[in-house]
Image (cartoon, rainbow, N blue to C red):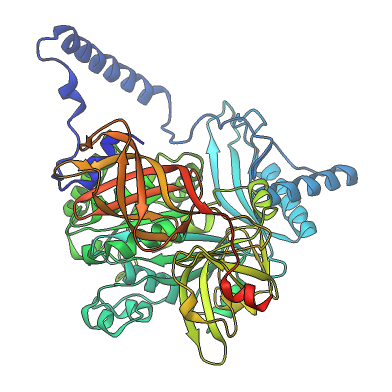
Amino acid sequence: MDARVSELFGSGNDSGSQDVASNVLPGNSYGVALKKSCVKMHKKSKSRFARNFKPSNNPPYLPPEAEEGNIEYKLKLINPTQYRFEHLATQMKWRLQEGRGEAVYQIGVEDNGILAGLSEEDLRTSLNTLHELAEKVGADITVLREREVDFDSDVPRKIAEVLIRKVPDDQQFLDLRVAVIGNVDSGKSTLLGVLTQGELDNGRGRARLNLFRHLHEIQTGRTSSISFEILGFNSKGEVVNYSESRTAEEICESASKMITFIDLAGHHKYLKTTIFGLTSYCPDFAMLVVSANTGIAGTTREHLGIAMALKVPIFIVISKVDLCMRATVERTVRQLERVLKQPGCNKVPMVVSSTDDAVTAAQQFAQSPNITPIFTLSSVTGESLDLIKVFLNIIPPLSNSKEQEELMQQLTEFQVDEIYTVPEVGTVVGGTLSSGICREGDDLVVGPTDLGQFHKLTIESIQRNRSACRVLRAGQAATLALGNFERSLLRKGMVMVSPEMDPTICWMFEAEIVLLFHAKTFHKGFQVTVHIGNVRQTATVEAVCGKEELRTGEKAVVVFKFLKHPEYLKVGAKLLFREGVTKGIGHVTKLQPIAQYRPSQSEDDAA
């Protein structure tokens, strides 16, 4: 990543990047003349365009259709033969499989992407055929939008964009994780309360009360821990939340698509918790919430920088628009646009103001990591809440079915993020299955301990989104009941792996890093808190290869050594470290294993 991303982490000011015009040298008369001639030409072409053409925001074509992926172009679907109908149904199954249960059909579009359009009658007939196809494969269709295309014809011609969603079989709903980040008091928990409970806030934080886990959070109104909330969409694209369903189990049964929100802390005091949530829970997307009346303040830049360093796609929500004038909201939008366009970010902001914008934003956001949709809404009046729901309903998963299948064929590996003791159940661990498949009754080993050992255990039961689940697949988050397994043997950062795996355990490792911000110099002996996936531990800098010391913005290969206990790491894993104002990012390049998998002493005795 560009070292200039450090601008987001530093204390810095909020002035944003310099104006593009400032890059033209003062003495460059050619630049001035060119600018004037461009303005004249623009004015002439603008007046000619106004006389001859009606304005249109629609692009004249789409990218050519891809063989893989979940997007299909169809010029028309009128009275297909039985053989053709069967072929189209098979094709729809393939597209749904590619999109893990979702597909988008563009009707009236040729395979090369040209928007040919259809007459009203042909479009209705094609949509009816599509509906019959969806029924055959057990899916539902939702027309996202219809729009006219500029075509030299007296008869208006339209194209239609249709979302097809497969009715879930055996609880296999599509699950996306969204991390919610932003400064303290920006309205993160309140927004999640409104989305998941289905009731607007009263302006004094009533909507967020159900999200808090501790008494001090209710008293202060500030989130200090990581909490999870779910929002479902059924196969027709309708919202399924607690307003209609009494329990999480009912939501899971009704939903074809599930959005799991990971509510993170905004206060700087809880930054380590926020970083742990972003690194450990592997969110698909991050939602940065910014208060309209305060703008970019506090930890907003820092959270944005951390999400970018971890390469998590970001969309932005400007909340509390009911508290301030329209001019203040627009100023906050401009402030965000300046920050997003900075060299360290290189993002393309896209303000969403209509349903059409929300559909376009969802599709472009998934295709290009640089697109950053910006929503302006209120949790009190409900202004523009529908737009964020449309966006979340349409947004596709980042990984396709092929990548999912490859992960499922690997050996089982489960990251331990949370540990509980539940009455009459015993020890329960929460986390994410990184690879493989996990079933009730499976025998796994968990570790490493302080001595680098692993203990045997058996999975008693599995719960996903608070409802029972028999099979857990790669990429899914869940809680696993371990029965009478001793809780004291577990800690956050451990992994549960298949006994056939040969896990690499290490005290020391090498990483290629970029020092994003440091007050003085970074050298041997310096101690930092290292975040690698679900691992969070203090480590000492043992050596800086090829250099005596590092300064802000410099790159180097550094050898780290954990202080408390060895950890299970993988080469290539993203790394983020911090200590006070010191921050850096990088990736693991080499491990120095202490020993391969060794059974614990208790297991040797049992044998």
Residue at the extreme top of the image, as rendered: 30
- Find residue 155 and report its image quarter: top right
Q: Nearer the viewer, residue 460 or 146?
A: 460
In the rendered image, the vertical position of residue 219 relative to residue 3, given as above or below: below
Left or right relative to 538: residue 446? right
In the rendered image, the vertical position of residue 345 relative to residue 433, given as above or below: above
Left or right relative to 466: residue 307? left
Residue at the extreme left of the image, as rendered: 27
Q: Nearer the viewer, residue 407 or 151?
A: 407
Q: Position of residue 144 (x, y in %)?
A: 56, 52
Left or right relative to 134: residue 59? left
Observer able to see residue 390 = yes
In the rendered image, the vertical position of residue 292 relative to residue 17, given as above or below: below
The quadrant of the image that shows the N terminus is top left
Q: Nearer the viewer, residue 333 or 402?
A: 402
**Number of marks:** 0
Q: Position of residue 111 (x, y in %)?
A: 67, 31
Q: Position of residue 577 (x, y in %)?
A: 31, 51
Residue depicted at 32% across the width and 22% down the height: 46
Residue at the extreme bottom of the image, as rendered: 424
The quadrant of the image that shows the C terminus is bottom right
In the rendered image, the vertical position of residue 485 relative to residue 313, given as above or below: below
Q: Position of residue 436 (x, y in %)?
A: 66, 58
Residue depicted at 23% across the width and 49% down the height: 526
Residue depicted at 18% across the width and 30% down the height: 19
Observer able to see residue 351 = no
Residue depicted at 27% across the width and 41% down the height: 515
